[in-house]
Amino acid sequence: MTAHPRSVVLGVGMVLLGLAFVLVAIAMILPVAVNLPDSWFGAMLAFVVLALGVGCMYFGGQRLWMTPK
């Protein structure tokens, strides 16, 4: 059984999607920082979006640079 070739488009798409998530999270941080005591939900939402973005970029990069065995 041969290894399936990695899809470069999927890897690049995951990296770009992750970058978009990180940029959205950065845009969410300023309003949350101004009203931090009242907006704990916004802070948690920004953290989740940031974690999603970092995860997408990590796994997209792994798809691009790791060679199948």
Image (cartoon, rainbow, N blue to C red):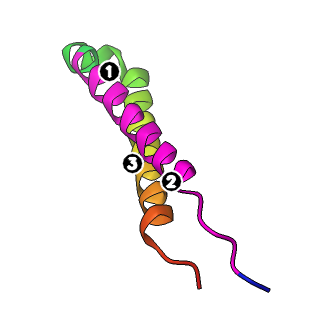
Give the CA distance from mark 3 to mark 1.
16 Å
- How dense is the environment of label 1, judged by Cα within 10 Å: few (below 14), some, or many (20 and up)? some
Give the CA distance from mark 1 to mark 2.
26 Å
Q: Which residue is mark 2?
A: 11
Q: Which part of the image, by quadrant, shows the N terminus?
A: bottom right
- Say which label, 3 or 2, has the lower sequence index: 2
**Is 40 located above or below residue 9 in the figure?**
above
Q: Which residue is mark 3?
A: 54
Q: Looking at the picture, how far across and down is residue 52, in whole percent? A: 47, 43
Find out whether residue 20 is within the magenta segment.
yes
Q: Looking at the picture, how far across and down is residue 65, in whole percent? A: 42, 68
Callout 1: SS:
helix
Q: Looking at the picture, how far across and down is residue 12, in whole percent? A: 46, 48
Q: Amino acid at mark 2?
A: Gly
Q: Main secondary structure of the magenta part?
A: helix
Q: Amino acid at mark 1?
A: Met
Find out whether residue 39 is within the magenta segment.
no
Q: Residue at x 50, y 77 (%)?
A: 67
Residue pushed farthest right?
1
Q: Which residue is mark 1?
A: 28
Q: Which residues are magenta?
A: 3-30
Q: Residue at x 27, y 28 (%)?
A: 26
Q: Give whichever of 21, 66 is nearer the camera.
A: 66
